[in-house]
Image (tube, rainbow, N blue to C red):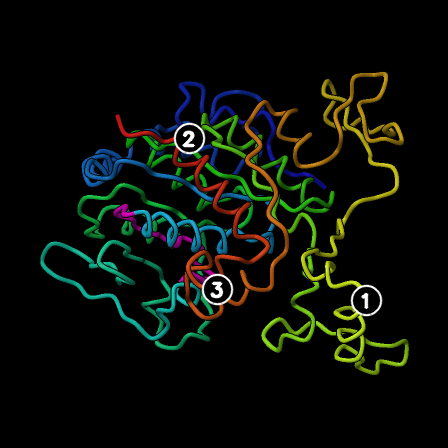
């Protein structure tokens, strides 16, 4: 059940806490009193962020769709292009960034000027609560105010110095962390958000909520990325121990080497091809009526728009429905996962992998949408 107050006017509104839709909200008294309207830290954040040219949030209403993976590899790629990059992990309860940047075991150092990021390279600094835990397996059991306090500290106390890009990895949802980061960065000229989804409806149902969150808070959406859109297995990867892909019989017997010899002898051109599977594609795609938030009808068999003007219920159709850019598809790629586990740049370690060109194209679009002024 959706329990979000769809009629919330927002804590900064002059009507906050005073309209009928505020009745029953636990924050009604605070909003009505004006306590939430002016936070002195906002001006301080604006001052601290003055040296950061571009600030980008990585969002998704759904967990497990690849936000941290995308954040880490976006930071790596921008740094390899010669940019000065900071990566801020505000997923307080599930900080994955230290692992994905190869920084497990590192600690934050504090000086008179504030907290120093942990550096991968001279031009790539990282900050995460993962650097502050006594043990990497410690659970963070915090309520909202304490999480918000740490996010504020990350924005005011971390000495980023001059940056071309600050990439901010967020937890799933539209809760305290998201409200805080948007409120603090609005006055600091945030560029916008990249929204990550996977193509199944289980994911998109929550991502639509995230897109509505961006609309209500006035946060620009730089684009939607369709992650894990399909899986592509090159024939050349068969038998490669790093790829871990084999041909097996119904009984599970590995016949990779035997079949590879036959392929090379009878049809060697297969070695230049890949097997591709759309992981979540249904025989008949659904469409969503652009004039309704709930109506779902059936598409034509060819996947085109139906006679009622509905849009395909796909990430691309969802982006079109919300009038935001669609940045493209990223296939599921074991080497992307491997790069994150090893704390390496995917494009540097696996430049010929199946997701390399699509990922590079997405990054290039983001760079083009955030020009220096």
- Labelled disc at residue 340: 3
Residue 68 higher or lower than 314, as above or below: below
In the displayed structure image, the side of residue 249 where residue 367 appears, left or right = left
Give the magenta part as a residue range.
82-97
* Lower position in the chain sequence, tag 2 or tag 1: 2
Residue 127 higher or lower than 184, as above or below: below
* Lower position in the chain sequence, tag 3 or tag 2: 2
The quadrant in which residue 236 appears is bottom right
The residue carrying mark 2 is 31
Determine contact: label 2, label 1, CB under 8 Å.
Answer: no
The quadrant in which residue 162 appears is top left
Q: Residues within 10 Å of mark 3 (few under 14, many from 20)?
A: many
* Quarter of the image where the N terminus is located: top right
Q: Nearer the viewer, mark 3 or mark 2?
A: 3
* Quarter of the image where the C terminus is located: top left
The residue carrying mark 1 is 266
**Residue at x 41%, y 59% (from the top left corner):** 348
Rendered location of residue 295, percent (x, y): 80, 26
Q: Residues within 10 Å of mark 1 (few under 14, many from 20)?
A: few
Residue sitting nearer the eye, 159 or 31: 159
**Residue at x 26%, y 61% (from the top left corner):** 121
Rendered location of residue 126, percent (x, y): 31, 58
The residues bearing labels 2 and 1 have C-alpha atoms spaced at a distance of 74 Å
Residue sitting nearer the eye, 226 or 98: 226
Q: Nearer the viewer, mark 1 or mark 3?
A: 1
């Amino acid at each position: 059940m959706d329990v979000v107050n769809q009629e919330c006017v927002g804590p900064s509104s002059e009507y906050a806490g005073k309209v009928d839709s505020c009745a029953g909200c636990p924050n009604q008294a605070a909003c009505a009193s004006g306590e939430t309207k002016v936070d002195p830290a906002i001006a301080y954040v604006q001052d601290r962020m003055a040296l950061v040219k571009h600030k980008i949030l990585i969002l998704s209403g759904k967990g497990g769709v690849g936000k941290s993976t995308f954040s880490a590899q976006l930071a790596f790629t921008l740094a390899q292009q010669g940019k000065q990059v900071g990566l801020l992990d505000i997923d307080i309860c599930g900080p994955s960034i230290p692992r994905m940047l190869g920084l497990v075991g590192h600690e934050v150092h504090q000086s008179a000027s504030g907290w120093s990021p942990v550096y991968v390279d001279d031009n790539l600094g990282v900050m995460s609560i993962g650097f502050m835990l006594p043990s990497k397996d410690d659970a963070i059991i915090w309520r909202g105010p304490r999480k918000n306090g740490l996010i504020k500290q990350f924005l005011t106390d971390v000495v980023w110095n001059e940056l071309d890009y600050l990439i901010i990895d967020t937890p799933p949802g539209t809760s305290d962390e998201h409200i805080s980061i948007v409120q603090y960065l609005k006055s600091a000229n945030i560029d916008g958000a990249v929204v990550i989804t996977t193509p199944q409806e289980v994911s998109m149902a929550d991502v639509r909520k995230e897109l509505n969150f961006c609309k209500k808070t006035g946060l620009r959406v730089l684009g939607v990325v369709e992650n894990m859109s399909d899986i592509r297995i090159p024939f050349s990867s068969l038998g490669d121990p790093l790829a871990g892909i084999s041909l097996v019989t119904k009984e599970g017997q590995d016949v990779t080497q035997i079949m590879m010899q036959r392929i090379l002898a009878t049809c060697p051109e297969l070695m230049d091809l890949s097997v591709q599977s759309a992981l979540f594609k249904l025989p008949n795609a659904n469409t969503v009526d652009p004039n309704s938030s709930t109506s779902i009808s059936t598409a034509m068999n060819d996947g085109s728009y139906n006679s009622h003007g509905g849009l395909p219920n796909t990430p691309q159709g969802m982006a079109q429905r919300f009038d935001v850019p669609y940045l493209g598809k990223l296939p599921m790629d074991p080497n992307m996962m491997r790069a994150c586990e090893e704390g390496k740049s995917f494009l540097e370690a696996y430049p010929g992998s199946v997701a390399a060109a699509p990922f590079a194209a997405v990054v290039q679009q983001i760079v083009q949408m955030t020009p220096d002024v």
